[in-house]
Image: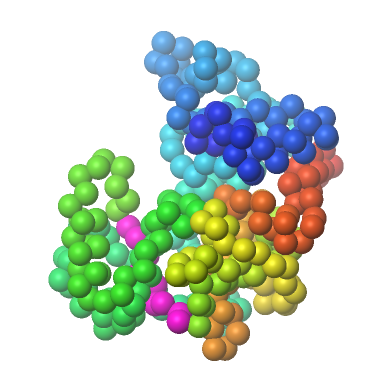
Amino acid sequence: MLEKYSNMGDAITPARFLEEAKKQEIDLRIVGIADCHVSCENGGHVIWKGEDLKENAPDIVINRYKFGEIKDRINTYTGHAFNNICSFNKYLSKGVQRSELSFLWSGEKAILSYPKTLMIHRLSDVGENVKLIGEQLGFPVVAKGLLGSCGAEVTLLENEKEVQNYLRIWQENKNAYAEEERLFQKFLSDTKGSDVRSLCVQGEVLGSMIRKGPSGDFRSNVALGGTVKETTIIPEIREAAQRIFEHTGLFCFGLDLLPDHEGFAFCEINVMPGLSGIEEATGKNMTGEILYRIRQECLHK
């Protein structure tokens, strides 16, 4: 299983995967991308803690890291004993997340409403972007990075001045890995720091929960202290989950909806969903179910 670091076995979701893998007699290891390097001395193989991952290829890879050359190389090393089904959630690229804007539409019929959204490039004109955001989205507005998790890159900008400062700081970021594009989304005041998260596997919704953020925070992430409660799975969520699966091939993802005056609006797809909240809310062993389905997919498809 690919994560950022190899020592993430103590983190809640990786720990749950290790626990359930042991029960199902699956030899699961956490390979941290940050602990790997590519060596030119052996044909550009990925080396992890001294081990050549091409020479010791895993049977399958479960991707919980989003992008990068090292990740992509490891995914090419998987064996082909299981009907060529080797990589799960392989394409967790920025391209998948950019496509959020079109996931839920079929022709002219939308499954769910979608907050007005703009995608802006880091190097485009700050003044023009401030004007564009004000005219099309209004204030306040939510700025969202494409690569973050746990709400780390989600920011509420209250007014024109805050938007201008945010854009300038982003533009002046000289970090070589600075995101070139970000989403800016109309803030839905009806959310009041809550949303609905559904866990979807193979296009099927396994469970839904209401997440409520801590007092004073518009974000509802469990990692930030949010509380959870199970809720009914509505038909629109089932249809959206199936369409997203057909469009992206994502084996497992979280589907987030925001409450608005018409019911619910689409918020985002989480390609690396945490599992502690949904397991707490539903009382179901979601981690075990994911691993069971991976096994069944490999052995019987």
Up the image or down, 117 lies above or below 95; here it is below
Total number of numbered discs in the rendering: 0
- Image coordinates of residue 149 in percent, x first then y, are 48, 52
Up the image or down, 46 lies above or below 187; here it is above
Q: Residue at x 22, y 76 (%)?
A: 160
Q: Kindly tell me whether residue 131 is visible in this rendering.
A: yes
Q: Residue lying farthest bottom?
A: 261
Up the image or down, 280 lies above or below 138; here it is above
Look at the image and say whether residue 150 sits in the magenta stretch.
no
Q: Kindly tell me whether residue 85 is visible in this rendering.
A: no
Up the image or down, 78 lies above or below 62; here it is above
Judging depth in this view, the residue of 301 and 174 nearest the camera is 174
Relative to residue 169, is residue 216 drawn left or right? right
Q: Residue at x 17, y 66 (%)?
A: 126
- Image coordinates of residue 194 in percent, x first then y, are 55, 72
Q: Quadrant of the C terminus?
A: top right
Toward which corner of the image does residue 131 lie, by quadrant? bottom left
Judging depth in this view, the residue of 88 and 49 nearest the camera is 49
Q: Residue lying farthest top?
A: 41
- Image coordinates of residue 62 in percent, x first then y, are 63, 39
Magenta part of the protein: which range? 181-189
Q: Residue at x 68, y 33 (%)?
A: 60
Relative to residue 24, is residue 161 drawn left or right? left
Relative to residue 298, is residue 212 drawn left or right? left
- Image coordinates of residue 52 in percent, x first then y, are 55, 16
